[in-house]
Image (tube, rainbow, N blue to C red):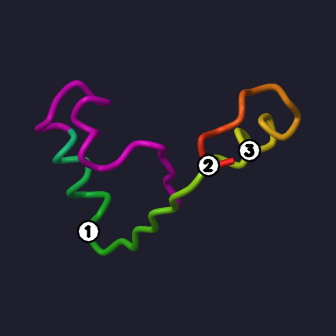
């Protein structure tokens, strides 16, 4: 099973509106799992910026 999100684990309480529920979900999901954290600009945003649909980022 592969689960992706743009929210860090510490923000899941706000996503679900309940810190205890989020902790229970994460406990079950993360047990014996592998996590990958990918940092950087979204591919879609990069393409929109390249096409001139968004302003340029501070990095450019």
Find residue 13 and name its label.
none
> Alpha-carbon distance for marks 2 and 1?
37 Å
Which residue lies at the image location 81% right of the left edge and 42% below the top edge? 47
Please tell me which residue lies in front, 11 or 1: 11
Q: For this view, does 54 lie left or right of residue 24?
A: right
Q: Residue 26 in the image: x percent, y percent?
A: 25, 52
The location of residue 45, given as percent across then percent down, is 70, 39
The residue tagged 3 is 46
- Find the distance from the CA under tag 3 to the CA under tag 2: 12 Å
Mark 3 or mark 1: which comes first in sequence? 1
Q: Residue at x 85, y 30 (%)?
A: 52
Q: Residue beneath label 2, please?
A: 59
Please indicate, yes or no, whether residue 1 appears anywhere in the rendered image.
no
Q: Which residues are magenta?
A: 1-21
Q: Quadrant of residue 51?
A: top right
Density class for disc 3 (Cα within 10 Å; few <14, some 14-19, many ≥20) is some
Tell me the distance, in whole angstroms, between the alpha carbons under discs 3 and 1: 34 Å
- Residue hosting label 1: 31
Q: Position of residue 28 (x, y in %)?
A: 25, 58
Mark 2, secondary structure of its residue: loop
**Residue 13: within the magenta?**
yes
* Local secondary structure at mark 3: helix
């Amino acid at each position: 099973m592969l689960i992706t999100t743009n929210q860090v684990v510490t923000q899941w309480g706000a996503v679900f509106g309940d810190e205890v529920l989020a902790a229970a979900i994460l406990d079950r999901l993360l047990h014996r799992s592998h996590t990958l954290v990918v940092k950087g600009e979204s591919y879609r945003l990069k393409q929109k910026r390249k096409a001139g649909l968004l302003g340029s980022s501070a990095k450019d």
